Amino acid sequence: MAQERKKYTIDDIARELGVSKTTVSRALSGKGRIGKDTVERVRAFVEEHEYRPNRVAQGLARSKTYNLGLVIPGEYSGMPFFRDCIDGICQEAYRYNYDILFVVTREDGRAQLQRLVDNHKVDGIILTRTVMNSGHVEFLKKSRMPFVVIGPSDDPEVTSIDNPNREASRELTDFLLMKGLRRLALVGGNASHYVNRSRKRGFNDAHQEKGFHPDPALLFMEVEDYRKAVRVADQIMLAECDGIVCMDEMVCALILSCLREKGIAVPARMKLASMYDGSQLESNLPPVTSIRFDTKGLGRNACMEILGMLGEELRDDLFPMNYQVILRESTQ
Amino acid sequence: MAQERKKYTIDDIARELGVSKTTVSRALSGKGRIGKDTVERVRAFVEEHEYRPNRVAQGLARSKTYNLGLVIPGEYSGMPFFRDCIDGICQEAYRYNYDILFVVTREDGRAQLQRLVDNHKVDGIILTRTVMNSGHVEFLKKSRMPFVVIGPSDDPEVTSIDNPNREASRELTDFLLMKGLRRLALVGGNASHYVNRSRKRGFNDAHQEKGFHPDPALLFMEVEDYRKAVRVADQIMLAECDGIVCMDEMVCALILSCLREKGIAVPARMKLASMYDGSQLESNLPPVTSIRFDTKGLGRNACMEILGMLGEELRDDLFPMNYQVILRESTQ
DNA sequence: CTGAAAGCGCTTACAG
DNA sequence: CTGAAAGCGCTTACAG
């Protein structure tokens, strides 16, 4: 098929067209006054030879990289939230001809982030769901690298963007309270995640609005594996709860499977609802009532924010950040 | 704390030290003859001012980018396989001071890959689990971009690296046959994925070795959601199977949940085993016998391959690609 | 052992 | 409207 072609540079074009490379550059960027037919000739040449400017060289000249760093916590990278988020981020980045540099943080956490900054490989950074006190935010502030955080932040100097976790959690809880449930358990994973704090707050909000007091004994955190889930499920039954709110779909899948194992009928004997609507919830037995966020939109927004900070002319408004309560059998 | 510091360039260092930038460059790279104490002085300066060479400029001068493109199919990016794989790839790339540029392919598939190549943003590319006829391989061949494929390939010109899916599938199936099972169902997702073809082959291998013939009526593909799984579970029971081999942990979780729903006891009435040991299998009810691969090692190997192709001096040997059968309750 | 110079592929004042 | 020149931050023959 198509013969693999020579990689043209701006110099080649200039020579072939008998103009200076300044002119070619301008014809391509559209900046500065330039003859209409000159532009046309360049355009035609570019078209025919499929010339694409070397973005790296372009970057060097403009002191840019056209790369965005995306920091993802390794332990949770498989969660639907991150998948959706990444999706949105990439989609938006590509529109502006930026690329996403991936950083999976682990124990060595800071090291990789630092490498990225030290090597001047990115123009800005998107931090996702930082663990409290991870130090990433402080590091980035000090290094003067523009960044945004996906997740809550109480630091006014930090641009943060997030799903409305607290509100959604409040609404989901409120829905259960309206059904007459009075002893709701709240079950979650890692308590040191900001997101879980927000969801807990929403849970409390709903209670307080109605003049109720959530029982602190019904809060169960750090449910991250099967064994822990079994113990928690036992405690929930002992405590005579009538409903369970799960902070995410992983926890929910674990708890539900424990309930089934113990022969506790959902929703007959126990109502169940969960934050974040991953596919595990819809296809579970029974399907679980949950909150659906537009996480992809969240990712796009985060990307737009940082692009804006980098001086890109944004082509769209931010998406409004909404959520829906998806009613399913588990709360009937 | 630490005052944010000026970004030094190699020129700054040269000036401050009263040498030429050639010398500084050489002191840093260690190439060419150079005075021992000159090196020491440079090193000290670098240390004190935390100078790091601008990798992008370095790249331009050497016609490199120090980026690797990683192509992930969007629909499946949340699967444990990709998580583990990415993990290994990133880890290895960082060791060589390369970064990973993320490309999530969707319907627009080729476009993003092309953008990466056209913009000269990467030195090489890692393709993961290509769908048959995705065209990525052909495109990369034509563009002369070095690449490796994670997943099987029958093209001798393509460097491919993969988990031993066929062998592992054979062994898992063999294990069930050895237990005396004779009507095994094979259940999987997308039939157009190479990986599923390999696993099917292994399933057949095991049968043929023993002189058996797998019943084509017991092959169920395209099981991707709950509804489909329910129907398949019905058919499996109607067909009087005595065991099920699942091609991946997603499918397995779906099928198992259907069996529970129908009150079919595993392992008493039906044995169940699965390829790929994701966390869903261990913490399921009952825990499911499965194959564990060293997918992280696979990722590292793939990364080492491509780095080798790019002329990097590899510091380790490739990992041996193994797997283990993890016996759990579902086949007892 | 060290340096001046050209180059990687682009951009952008400055001058005409 | 167009071009020569300097520059982005590095590397690398070439000469000494």
Image (cartoon, coloured by chain):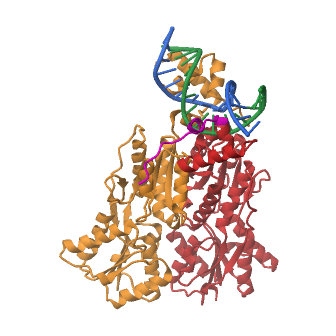
Chain colours: A red, B orange, C green, D blue
The quarter of the image holding the N terminus of chain A is bottom left
The quarter of the image holding the C terminus of chain A is bottom right
State the residue in front, B201 or A211.
B201
Instruction: Indicate whether A146 appears above or below B38.
Output: below
**Along the horizontal axis of the image, is B165 left or right of B43?**
left
Instruction: Indicate whether C3 appears above or below A247.
Output: above
User: Residue at (58%, 75%) from the top-left corner?
Assistant: A252
Question: In the orientation shown, which residue stands out farthest toward the left?
Answer: B211
Residue A224: x and y in percent read 55, 66
Magenta run includes residue B17 = no
Question: In the orientation shown, which residue stands out farthest toward the front?
Answer: A37
Instruction: Indicate whether A213 appears above or below B60.
Output: below
State the residue in front, B277 or B198.
B198
Magenta run includes residue A6 = yes
**Along the horizontal axis of the image, is A227 left or right of B233?**
right
User: Residue at (54%, 66%) from the top-left corner?
Assistant: B107
Instruction: Indicate whether B176 appears above or below A149.
Output: below
Give, as a single range, the part of the protein colored magenta: A1-22
Is residue B242 visible from the viewing direction of this image? no
Residue B117: x and y in percent read 52, 49
Residue A306: x and y in percent read 71, 52
State the residue in front, A23 or A195.
A23
Count of numbered marks: 0
Residue D8: x and y in percent read 66, 32
- Which image quadrant for residue A234? bottom right
